[in-house]
Amino acid sequence: MLHAGNSLRAIAQELRRSPATISREVRRNRDPRTGKHQPFRAKRRAAVRRAPSLEPGADLPGPARRLS
């Protein structure tokens, strides 16, 4: 979408997301040398961020973590 020349606002509207979310995603995954968005790199990095925790209950808040 971005490579096709669509604006960030147009992309946000199409995906039903906030323009700030789209802007952050594009900024986070730009090639520092060329400034172009790298969608495959973005997908890999997102998968790493979503990787499950090795510690059971790590996603629970303090007291609930100790009960699990």
Image (cartoon, rainbow, N blue to C red):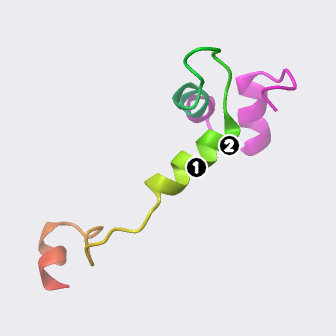
Which percent across, then down, holds residue 26? 61, 29
Where residue 22 appears, as percent x and y from the top left, is: 62, 33
Q: Read off the residue under disc 1.
A: 44
Seen from the viewer's position, the closer of residues 47 and 21 is 47
From this view, report whether residue 4 is shown above or below residue 61: above
- Amino acid type at circle 2 is Phe
Residue 32 location (% of width, % of height): 55, 18
Q: Is residue 40 left or right of residue 24?
A: right
- Magenta segment range? 1-22
Residue 12 tag number? none
Image quarter of residue 54: bottom left
C-beta proximity under 8 Å, tags 1 and 2: yes
From this view, report whether residue 37 is shown above or below residue 58: above
- Residue at position x 82%, y 24% in the image: 6
User: Is 4 covered by the magenta stretch?
Assistant: yes
**Lateral position of residue 61 relative to residue 47, left or right:** left
Residue 5 appears left or right of 30: right
Question: Residue farthest to the front?
Answer: 33
Q: Quadrant of residue 65?
A: bottom left
Dot 1 surroundings within 10 Å: few (below 14), some, or many (20 or more)? Answer: few
What residue is at 61 percent from the left and 36 percent from the top?
18
Cα–Cα span, label 1 and label 2: 6 Å
Location of the N terminus by quadrant is top right
For label 2, the residue is 40
Identify the residue at horizontal 67%, vertical 33% (top origin). 38
In the rendered view, would you say 36 is above or below 21?
above
- Residue 5 among those drawn in magenta: yes
